């Protein structure tokens, strides 16, 4: 039976949306940022051969939501599942991803200082477009795991506020932490995301 809040049987899904030098409006030209090569790029970072995520499918099997807090995100997920059931479909056939703005660094205070510097370049205060996390790669991994485990969403679409450093931190810190706990398997498309910034392929570590 499907459950809106118990997601232990659902696979955790993580995608990323790469655009410009990052999603923060002051990222372009900021120290250490670099423009993406080619068009904006949405890609799933976690592998699932059974049902790869496809934003273009019809009827939709992936729904992206935005929310100001975790409670609102959970309410949005419930709404999507209710509408899916009303349409005669299995709610578990739809993956609900909540957008999550991220700025991460090896130390949380470094990430907070970087965000403050970016915000200071704007003429008026910036309001996050959805949930936001500023901190460390491991802290982000824990939040993502909690979002899925608590039934807030089936996964996340990460919106890096700066690029490519946040992407590198995701690949080097966030994904490995989740993989080591058996929560995800990184997709080959991770390497393609890195290639968009002329970054080297990730180091693959075989499980012992």
Image: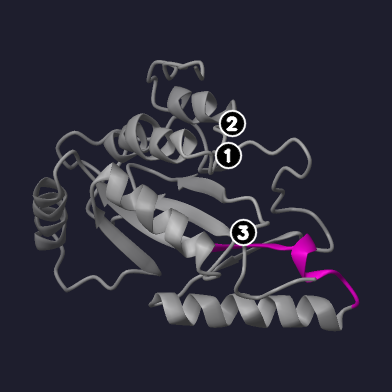
Residue at the image point whose x is 60% and y is 74% from the top: 5
Label 2 crowd bin: few (<14), some (14–19), many (20+), radius 10 Å: some
Give percent across and percent down for residue 110: 10, 46
* Stretch of the chain drawn in magenta: 88-98
**Disc 1: which residue:** 46
In front of the other: 23 or 169? 169
* Among the two numbered marks 1 and 3 on one chain, the one whose residue lies closer to the N terminus: 3
Q: Secondary structure at mark 1?
A: loop
Give percent across and percent down for residue 133: 30, 59
In this rendering, the label closer to the viewer, 1 or 3: 3
In front of the other: 47 or 197? 47
**Disc 2: which residue:** 187
Colour scheme in the image? one colour
The answer to whether any part of residue 167 appears in the image is: yes
Q: Within the magenta stretch, is there residue 92?
A: yes
* Among the two numbered marks 1 and 2 on one chain, the one whose residue lies closer to the N terminus: 1
**Disc 3: which residue:** 8
Q: Secondary structure at mark 2?
A: loop
Residue at the image point whose x is 83% and y is 60% from the top: 58
Give percent across and percent down for residue 180: 45, 33
The relative height of residue 14 versus residue 192 in the rendered view (above or below) is: below
Label 1 crowd bin: few (<14), some (14–19), many (20+), radius 10 Å: many
Q: How many marks?
A: 3
* Among the two numbered marks 3 and 2 on one chain, the one whose residue lies closer to the N terminus: 3
Mark 1 and mark 2: span between their CA atoms? 5 Å
Label 3 crowd bin: few (<14), some (14–19), many (20+), radius 10 Å: few
**Image check: 206 left or right of 166?**
right
Residue at the image point whose x is 74% and y is 82% from the top: 82
């Amino acid at each position: 039976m499907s459950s809106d809040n118990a997601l232990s049987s659902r696979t955790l899904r993580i995608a990323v949306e790469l655009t410009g030098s990052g999603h923060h409006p002051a990222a372009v030209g900021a120290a250490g940022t670099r423009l993406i090569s080619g068009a904006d790029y949405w890609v799933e970072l976690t592998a699932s051969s059974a049902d790869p995520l496809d934003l273009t499918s019809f009827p939709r099997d992936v729904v992206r939501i935005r929310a100001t807090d975790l409670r609102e995100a959970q309410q949005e997920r419930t709404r999507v599942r209710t509408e899916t059931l009303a349409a005669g479909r299995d709610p578990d056939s739809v993956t609900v991803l909540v957008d999550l703005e991220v700025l991460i660094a090896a130390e949380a205070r470094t990430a907070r200082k970087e965000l403050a510097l970016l915000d200071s370049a704007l003429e008026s205060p910036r309001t996050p477009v959805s949930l936001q996390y500023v901190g460390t790669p491991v802290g982000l991994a824990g939040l993502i795991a909690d979002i899925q485990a608590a039934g807030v969403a089936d996964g996340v679409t990460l919106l890096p506020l700066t690029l490519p450093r946040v992407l590198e931190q995701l690949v080097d810190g966030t994904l490995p932490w989740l993989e080591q706990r058996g929560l995800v398997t990184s997709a080959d498309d991770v390497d393609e995301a890195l290639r968009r910034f002329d970054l080297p392929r990730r180091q693959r570590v075989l499980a012992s």
